[in-house]
Image (spheres, rainbow, N blue to C red):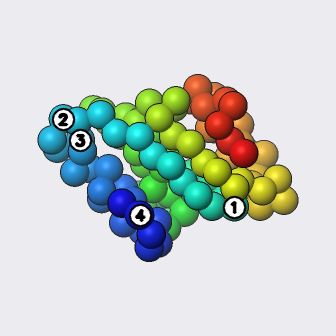
Amino acid sequence: MLGGGHETAYGHFLGYVGAKKKVGTLNIDAHLDVRPCSDGLGHSGSPFRQALEHPTQPLAGDHYVCLGAQPHSVSHAHWKYVLERGRSGALV
């Protein structure tokens, strides 16, 4: 998927899960978009966390890349969350 808001990203990820295909994510954004869900519901800031935490086929940490993440736009907690899932070197 290319373009548009992140509110559709998790739905697209679920298509790969349903087809039992491997998938990688390239997020081009100043934010990591790994915020927790709100009251159990996803939103435009949560799709990559939802994918990383999928109950049966989670997105592998090394299959999530964010280009453009800005230190002043990314909370320490979100940076740490992504690093703990195995994504180290491709956060630029």
Residue beneath the point at 24% across and 44% down: 16
**Mark 3 is on which residue type?**
Val
Q: Which mark is residue 12?
A: none
Residue 83 seen in this snapshot: no
Camera-near label (4 vs 3) is 4
Q: Residues within 10 Å of mark 4 (few under 14, many from 20)?
A: few
Asked whether 62 or 79 is in front, the reply is 62
Asked whether 35 or 27 is in front, the reply is 27
Residue to which mark 3 is pinned: 17
Q: Is residue 22 left or right of residue 31?
A: left
Q: Are marks 2 and 4 in contact (CB under 8 Å)?
A: no
Name the outermost residue toward the bottom: 4
Which of marks 3 and 1 precedes in the sequence? 3
Kindly indicate the quadrant of the structure image that contains residue 73. Answer: bottom right
**Mark 4 is on which residue type?**
Leu
Camera-near label (2 vs 4) is 4
**Mark 2 is on which residue type?**
Lys
Q: CA distance from mark 1 to mark 3?
A: 26 Å
Q: Is residue 13 left or right of residue 38?
A: left
Q: Which mark is residue 20?
A: 2
**Mark 1 is on which residue type?**
Ala
Q: Residues within 10 Å of mark 3 (few under 14, many from 20)?
A: some
Residue 29 image position (x, y, % from top left): 63, 61
Residue to which mark 1 is pinned: 30
Q: CA distance from mark 4 to mark 1?
A: 16 Å
Residue 67 image position (x, y, % from top left): 64, 51
Q: For mark 4, give the secondary structure.
A: loop
